[in-house]
Image (cartoon, rainbow, N blue to C red):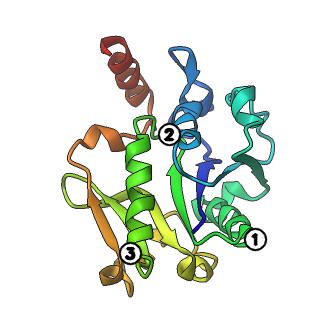
Amino acid sequence: MAVVGIYLAAGQSRRMGENKLALQVGKMTLGSLALDTAIDSALDQIFVVTNADDELYWIPSRMRTHKKCTILPCPNSNEGQSVSLQCGIKHAMEHGASAAIVLLADQPFITKLMINEMINCFNQNPNSQYVATASYDGLMKPPILFSSSLFPALLNIRGDKGAREIIRGRVYNQGKRLPCEDHRLLFDVDTPEDYNSLLSHFKEA
């Protein structure tokens, strides 16, 4: 069963005040960290959804040209995350994917193990509607795997929280939740303070 990744990289970075994906983190950019992890995982294909005017200088050429990666400029990405997600879902459907894992480009600590565990869980439970990451406090957070059976519903959502609302609603008991005890793995970078915390982590590592 083909499981693809939808890498959401079309945010507006309003709280950061500049394109956060291009911020330097060691020898990498913030936006390339989780993408590098996704490429190294068991995902069959990765659809990188970007703003239509993104010059993509935050993505190293080896990733842009990688056989797993397809760059998808999203013309209306400023209308909300759901629009970017739907851009990826449409391509997942065209690809004939059995499921898609939604990944956020501002979550630099996502690991290959996390992604592969979600894929393995779905392969072992193919009737599951979703496989979600459950944080230490029990809340479901990205990355989240959606079965292809939910693709039509995802094409009808609006706003930034629609996908999670689908899970919390009619299919809540029809999926799997994988616990993530280390909340740092789900850390996302939205503000200058978050970025400074990220840099401090890399200095300590």
Q: Is residue 32 above or below residue 176?
A: above
Who's the residue at 56% across and 40% down the image? 14
CA–CA distance between discs 3 and 2? 29 Å
How far across and how far down the image is residue 10, in percent? 65, 48
- Mark sitting earlier along the chain (3/1): 1
Disc 1, SS? helix
How far across and how far down the image is residue 191, in percent? 44, 33
How far across and how far down the image is residue 169, in percent? 37, 83
Q: As drawn, which residue projects farthest toward the top?
A: 203
- Which of discs 1 and 2 lies nearer the camera? The answer is 1
- Mark sitting earlier along the chain (3/2): 2
Q: Amino acid at mark 1?
A: Glu
CA–CA distance between discs 1 and 2? 26 Å
| Residue 23 in view here | yes
**Front in this rendered view, residue 113 or 16:** 113
Q: Disc 2 marks which residue? A: 106
Q: Is residue 48 above or below residue 141?
A: above
Who's the residue at 62% across and 32% down the image? 19
Q: Which mark is residue 94?
A: 1
Who's the residue at 23% across and 42% down the image? 182
Image quadrant in which the C terminus is located: top left
Disc 2, SS? loop
Q: Is residue 183 above or below residue 101?
A: above
Who's the residue at 62% across and 55% down the image? 44
Instruction: Characterize the local packing of mark 3: few (<14), some (14-19) or many (20 or more) Cα atoms within 10 angstroms.
Output: some
Q: Amino acid at mark 3?
A: Asn
Q: Quadrant of residue 20?
A: top right
Q: Quadrant of residue 154?
A: bottom right
| Residue 17 in view here | no
Image quadrant in which the N terminus is located: bottom right
How far across and how far down the image is residue 192, in percent? 44, 27
Q: Disc 3 marks which residue? A: 125
